Image (spheres, helix red, strand yellow):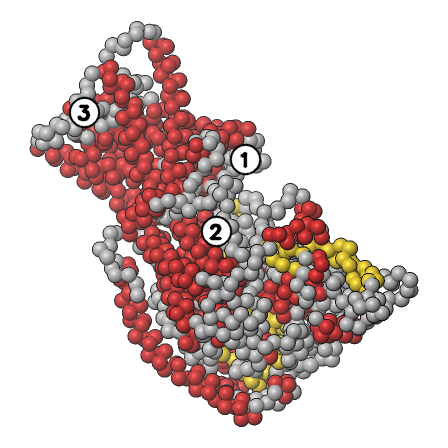
Amino acid sequence: MQSAVDIGWGTILAIKTVVVLAIIPLGAIILGYTFLLKMMAHMQSRLGPMDPGGFHGWFQLFGDGIKFMQKEDVMPAQSDRRIFAVAPAVVVISTFLVFLVIPAGPDLVVSNLDVGVFYALAVSSLAVVGVLMAGWASANKFALLGALRAGAQLIAYELPLLLAVVGVVVMAGTMSLQGIVEAQQNGSIFGWDGIGNPFIFGQIIGFMLFLVAAQAELTQTPFDMPVAESELVAGYMVEYTGFRFLFFFIGEFGTAFAFAGLAATLFLGGWAIPHVTDPGWSNVLGPIVLLTKVMLVAFLMFWVRFTYPRLREDQLQAVAWKFLIPIGLANILITGALKVAF
Amino acid sequence: MPKLPKPKAPGLIGGLGVTFKTMLKGAVTVQYPHEREDPPTRARGVIALKEENCTVCMLCARQCPDWCIYIEGHKEKRPPRREGGRERTVSLLDRFDIDYALCMYCGICVEVCPFDALFWSPEYEYSEANIADLLHDKEKLGEWMETVPEPEPLEVGAESGKK
Amino acid sequence: MSVDFAVDRQAWRHLADAQVNVELDTGDMILNLGPQHPATHGTLRLVVRLDGERVISADPVIGYMHRGYEKLTEFRTYPQITTLINRIDWLSSFANEVPFLHGAEMLMDIEAPPRAQYIRTILTELSRIATFMLFLGEMGLQVGALTPPFYGFRDREHVLNLIEAATGGRFHPNFNRIGGLKDDLPWGWINECRNGMKVVLDACNTLEELVAENEIFEARTRSIGIIPPEVGAGYGVSGSNLRASGVDWDLRRDGKPYLVYPELDFKVWTHPDGDSYARYWVRLQETREAARMVIQMLDRIPSGPIMAKVPRIIKVPEGEVFVETENPLGQMAYYVISKGATGPFRVKIRSASFSNVSILPWLLRGVYVPDVITILGSLYFILGDIDR
Amino acid sequence: MADDLEKEQSGAAEEVSVEQQLARTDEPAAAEQARADADEADAPPTEEQAEGESRPLDETEQELLTRLERELGDAIVESADAFGMLVVRVKPDAWRRAAEASKHELECDYLSFISGVDWQPAPREGDEAGGDTSAPVQPTEMTFGVAGSTGRLQVFAHLESTKRHWGVTLKTDVDASAPHAESWVTTYPGADWHERECWEMYGIAFDGHPSLRHLYLPSEFEGHPLRKDYPLLARVVKPWPGLVDVEPMPGEDTPTAENGGSSADADKGDGADAAQSADADQGESS
């Protein structure tokens, strides 16, 4: 894959990291604005922000960002200062690392690791550490309860997440995300290769499992025990203000963007458009196609978030261990058997 | 009676259907500063004072549960109506303040006033930055008089005996 | 059935004025839910002693909203008291005035004309619908769903607009007088009310579909906070909370006949389980029932005067009367002792939420923290009702 | 499907409640009828009812009374009817026994409330309360309500039966010197809060109560607010806007007390009765 202009290896890496660093807050804002503000509002028969920025309040989240930046960054007196300061950074770093692997075009990916999927899931579980640090350091009982719940929940839902992805890897035969995208583009469903073979058909159970597990990873309703407004007010984020709270906000929606990106790549064929193979076009259309698929998956996730009540702590664990994991294992079994048979 | 049991999708899917349908239906928000929803004619927004009717009988100040009406009046001599009759003494208002910071809009003063000097007006946009400005004096209460609507016609079957 | 407050005296003084700092003494942690907390409808403070996430003992601390109504009523005349008492349960404020004025009318041997009785009952049922619409949405929020409260509030607007069109005040109508009402209904109010009732019935179906039939909601509320009938009655729990435990007792049908309820046919809904889900379900059916009752009344409203012959200065003859009515939150009653003056000598205000909340220490033992919030939501109390 | 589940249960409950409804409608109607006849029979003006010679009890009240008498015997001091509700005054030492009797004999499982009454008329503030004369003027001599009272303080409670749909009000006297009463917490657990409130507001201690501490008022509050001699502080602080200091007419030195005059003639100097008359003629004139 020879890019048109031959520039130094270092500068390419620098450009890519800058682009990724820019995408994440932008992605968080796009996702946050369209779903959290506008879609949720219309689902609740109201309009959402209309005034900021004139047309339909597009400036709302940018304004929030600026507002948070100039707010005073308060540290509770009895808090563990260093850990309190570092915690949000840990959460956001785990999101940045996931983006390194998601491809937006034939060569629009920071580093095309062969073990891409494995790396992405491993890195996404870093957030647990950040959450526990935040909860413990802010010396507040509500934060402590929220953090303990978050720890238990994130660990419990790593497993179903992995099992869901294993099915895809089995079908694609490779763990590198570019490989998975190609497998879906060139694959065919029982001979007919009109739209390639997006794994959502073969792996419908895997897709559902991934969505449910991603919902839990993002601590969104019906799994938002750690940040339960009516009980723990704001869970582990309760003592954070100003710029650090902005980090948490970007972390939350950045991870949502990352997981939606992963789901789109693994199950909906990523940036690939069937039968469009020449790299020039793909590089241009790739990101747009990926964005639409991401918005589609994100719509599903947020739609569930605004409709369902919240599960209780023990029910949440029961759903993970007794319900999701057996289904994940069964899914792998069936995929393996079918793979061997055909 | 409770609706016919139409084929029941499991509750989880039914819930999603409800939110999706509402998303497509229009929103009900009234964007306040640009659009306004006008309150019904009987809404109790602010109390208006018709100064000519007031005879400083202090009934409203006495009956107000919140003690938020402050009245000062004086008496004057007036030429008799018919010549040769006795000189009339008339009470005039010097000060008639209603403190809307204390008022709870119960309407006892409007009702107890024997000379119909106080009226309700559905006006509601008189909030102030400084709470002291909520003490409306005689002129301000007079201004509200224009916003007092005509009493509505009553429902069918109502005996319109009372005022 | 003894109540065990197994906490020594010194701990109470410490507990009551406990500042919010970390007190991790030997395992159980004291958590202050409130007085500013999203799950309490107002300023209820729950001092909860936790072992992990399980509640060992919960002690509600009330009085943050105490306005001393019983003392104030001794310094007020009857019209002034009606403006006072509709601020006890501010969500169904018209329903608060009905028992007090009925008591005063009984003492003065005055009967409100039939049209006034009908309009009073319609407005009571409208305030019941307004309260329950808010509850049906709010319960979803307590359990974590973000959308139901907006539906509850949106459809409640129709009812509040009706009340405002007739009485002038959305929350505090102040429309009730001894011997009748202040004024008659405005033009076109009756079919306006019919459309409102259609909206309410549709809203009940939407909320049932969104919340009551949701499996996660059922998982969160079924068999949570079960109140056995005899314990509930012992604590004085009343209204939908008691009917949800299977007690078939509704003052509109079983108590002394008041307003026009004897002429209406309505069903008293009960549920055998007595858990949080039953309380939600009973209130949902009662909202529908209230809407049907209003439609019945609208068809049969008689014409005629709105106010009985009442002297200008009201002096209530000497005597005592106890009047109880079925308010949305439960049994609301006034024990009016009058000595022939323009104001009562002593009024005992029996409000429903006071007793509904007094069962919390018994009910919350051994419960998870999230279930504490569900139970608080399902009991549905209003702070003004508790603290008076 | 959950909804159908509710339907069967409610369906079942429906049959049950329909029969009960039929059975029940005739019972209160009969009671209502009896009371109505009793009223026509001797048609007493309500004043006569006040002198303690109360209207005859209708038969639900009669049945309640006989059951209570069978249980408590002479502990019942006096009983009367107050607008269709039985009021029974029992001796102070039989207060807990009365609770148990009504719980078992009368099947009154529902505790409505427990509270106190202070029969002493409030001292007339007149000028201290900022000259407020709008407060209702209570009679100055001490009279007791239905079923009388020996002293100034009384505890009264109301109990109801959720099954039989009737209720009774129990009263007992409390001597003002050392006010105390027996606690009902063992029979009705709900009595705990009611008694704490009654202790806090009236100073009536309840022996046998697990932890008598403040319910509404802050822990360092002294005094018992609902007692009649406890002033309403809010009204002492602010002068009453209804007060009118009438200046003399120009050229006269004393304010002329016009009758039927539009301006109020209750000036500072008048005592309580003037305020009373002011109120009265105010009423007539308007």
Residue at 91%, 62% in the rendered image: D251
Q: Nearer the viewer, residue C316 or C366?
A: C316
In the image, residue C353 sits, relative to residue B12, either above or below, namely below
Q: Secondary structure at mark 3?
A: loop
Q: Are marks 2 and 1 on the same chain?
A: no
Kindly indicate the quadrant of the structure image that contains residue C177: bottom right
Tell which tag, 2 or 3, sits nearer the viewer: 3
Q: Secondary structure at mark 1?
A: loop
Mark 2 vs mark 1, CA separation in Å: 26 Å
Tell which tag, 2 or 1, sits nearer the viewer: 2
Q: Disc 1 sits on a residue from what chain?
A: A
- Looking at the picture, which amino acid does disc 1 mark? Ser
Q: Which residue is mark 2?
A: C39
Mark 1 vs mark 3, CA separation in Å: 54 Å
Residue at 33%, 41% in the rendered image: A303
Q: In the picture, which quadrant includes the N terminus of chain D?
A: bottom left
Kindly indicate the quadrant of the structure image that contains residue D91: bottom right
Q: Earlier in the sequence, mark 1 or mark 3?
A: 1
Q: Are marks 1 and 3 in contact (CB under 8 Å)?
A: no
Q: Which residue is mark 3?
A: A274
- Looking at the picture, which amino acid does disc 2 mark? Ala
Q: Disc 2 sits on a residue from what chain?
A: C
Q: Nearer the viewer, residue A215 or A60?
A: A60
Can you give x and y, in whole percent of width and height, for residue A225 in the image?
40, 44
Can you give x and y, in whole percent of width and height, for residue B109 in the image?
66, 62
Can you give x and y, in whole percent of width and height, for residue A144 in the image?
47, 41
